[in-house]
């Protein structure tokens, strides 16, 4: 079956598989590091409580069979170990069936985590990792040539990722159409990075050029992925450059890196590095690849229809296995940045002269003098949810109240999610949450004060509470 394999993409497959294994490794390490505080039996939104009212058919997961914090840790660390093995090249040193089994195991383990992850895993890059990871099962290893149908499905996924993101912008906030969204976005994005302050202060004509270039890259360039080489490689290269620009301008977990990895699979590097084997592989392998391709093409109907729909959904899955999904980001852009600042005090009778100490988060803005850190591709799930909570109290239900309770109790797992504990010896008597407006300092303010942010108190988001007190919902409802 000469038509089955494309040996000229041997090196592209290698780049793709190593990159995907690296992202899987990070994802499983994030899960192992954060799950006890967020999802554990005594976490902010415990998995057992979620499983008690969620049937398997809605959220397939190994944890429906049994849940314990020890089992969750075993799943996360097993996934990390297998990912590290694939990153080191073990997948190319074993028979093709064993390599397929390793990729399938990663997909099953991460699906089990995502489907019980609740609000902490409600991000488009989770489904993107799972959809890409499922395709990786059918991409083969060094024994066989890269299957053409699987390479096509990887391009189809990248097309939906880019084109869907472009359409959601055109259909969304007006500022995308008048090219002004980046007047605000670098400042108001969920988690700015160390270069975001400089990106924000670029001249406004350059911001407009950024938006125009984004429209071209997301709405025009993706069609080039389906054209003959070298056009497909040029299209993939433009996507990689645009994604690296986004990597430099902010922290978006592994979203941009997944787009780069997918684009790498469309590069024809044979002229520079040569080709690998053209072997199509055993008949059972070819049959599995073609059957999987037929299934995924059939499941693509609803995501494809969603792209042309006037009511386009963003970051949605149409099946509980997350095999083919719809993507998109920032259909609307926040014009003003609000941040929730949590404070505590030792004072047992808080009053006008009480000294309040601020809890410092690892990634989200807090201390105005702290340079926004580089976090991505690591993902700080609590920090991201704090950004959503600041936009509306609805996003804070029910985990924010639980978070305050854990801080009052001095929960060590929750405190590990923070950069600093202002009460290392003894938990505070009271905690409260304040809502601030944050903006980047001007160039003159930065020179005068050394601060990256300027913040202004807006209101009290949650009043002072203690463990013995009942806690009102955010916003006073």
Image (cartoon, helix red, strand yellow):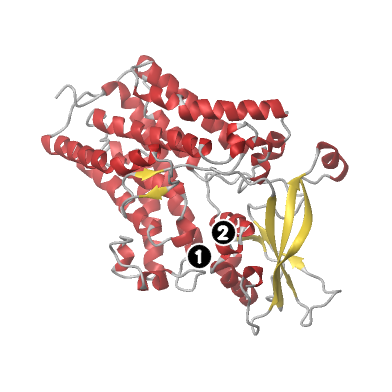
Q: Which residue is mark 1?
A: 38
Residue at the extreme left of the image, as rendered = 283
**230 or 276: which is nearer to us?**
230
The residue shown at (37%, 26%) is: 266
23 w.r.t. 78: above or below: above
**Quadrant of the rendered image containing residue 320:** bottom left
Label 1: few (<14), some (14–19) or many (≥20) C-alpha neighbours in 10 Å:
many
Q: Position of residue 36 (x, y in %)?
A: 48, 66
The residue shown at (65%, 85%) is: 468
Label 2: few (<14), some (14–19) or many (≥20) C-alpha neighbours in 10 Å:
many
> Quick one: label 2 or label 1, which is nearer the N terminus?
1
The residue shown at (44%, 22%) is: 235
108 w.r.t. 257: above or below: below
Q: Is residue 288 visible?
A: yes
State the quadrant of the N terminus: top left
Q: In the rendered view, does 461 fall on the left or right side of 403?
A: right
């Amino acid at each position: 079956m000469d038509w089955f394999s494309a040996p000229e993409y041997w090196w592209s497959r290698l780049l793709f598989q190593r990159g995907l294994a690296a992202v899987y490794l990070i994802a499983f390490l994030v899960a192992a590091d954060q799950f006890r505080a967020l999802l554990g039996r005594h976490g902010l939104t415990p998995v057992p409580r979620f499983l008690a009212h969620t049937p398997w058919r809605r959220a397939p997961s190994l944890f429906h069979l049994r849940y314990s914090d020890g089992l969750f840790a075993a799943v996360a660390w097993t996934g990390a170990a297998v990912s590290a093995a694939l990153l080191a090249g073990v997948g190319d040193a074993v028979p093709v069936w064993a390599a397929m089994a390793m990729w399938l195991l990663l997909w099953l383990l991460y699906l089990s985590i995502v489907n019980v992850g609740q609000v902490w895993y409600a991000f488009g890059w989770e489904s993107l990792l799972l959809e890409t990871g499922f395709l990786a099962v059918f991409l083969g290893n060094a024994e066989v040539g890269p299957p053409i149908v699987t390479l096509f499905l990887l391009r189809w996924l990248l097309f939906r990722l880019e084109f869907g993101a472009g359409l959601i912008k055109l259909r969304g906030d007006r500022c995308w159409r008048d090219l002004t969204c980046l007047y605000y976005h670098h400042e108001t994005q969920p988690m700015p990075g160390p270069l975001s302050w400089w990106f924000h202060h670029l001249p406004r004509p350059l911001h407009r050029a950024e938006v125009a270039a984004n429209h071209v890259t997301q709405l025009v360039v993706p069609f080039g992925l389906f054209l003959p080489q070298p056009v497909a490689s040029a299209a993939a290269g433009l996507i990689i450059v645009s994604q690296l620009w986004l990597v430099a301008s902010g922290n978006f977990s592994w979203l941009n890196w997944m787009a780069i990895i997918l684009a790498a699979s469309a590069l024809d590097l044979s002229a520079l590095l040569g080709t690998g084997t053209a072997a199509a592989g055993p008949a059972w392998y070819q049959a599995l690849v073609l059957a999987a391709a037929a299934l995924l093409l059939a499941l693509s109907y609803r995501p494809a229809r969603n792209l042309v729909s006037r009511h386009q959904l963003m970051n949605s899955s149409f099946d509980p296995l997350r095999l083919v999904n719809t993507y998109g980001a920032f259909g609307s852009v926040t014009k003003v940045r609000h941040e929730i600042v949590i404070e505590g005090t030792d004072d047992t009778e808080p009053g006008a002269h009480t000294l309040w100490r601020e809890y410092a988060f690892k990634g989200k803005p807090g201390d105005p003098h702290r340079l926004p850190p580089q976090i991505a591709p690591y993902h700080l799930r609590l920090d991201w949810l704090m950004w959503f909570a600041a936009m509306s109290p609805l996003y804070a239900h029910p985990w924010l109240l639980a978070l305050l309770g854990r801080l009052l109790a001095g929960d060590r797992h929750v405190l590990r999610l923070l950069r600093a504990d202002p009460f290392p010896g003894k938990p505070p008597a009271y905690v409260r949450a304040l809502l601030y407006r944050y903006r980047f300092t001007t160039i003159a303010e930065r020179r005068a004060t050394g601060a990256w942010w300027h913040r202004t108190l807006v209101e009290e988001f949650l009043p002072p509470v203690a463990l013995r007190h009942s806690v009102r919902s955010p916003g006073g409802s």
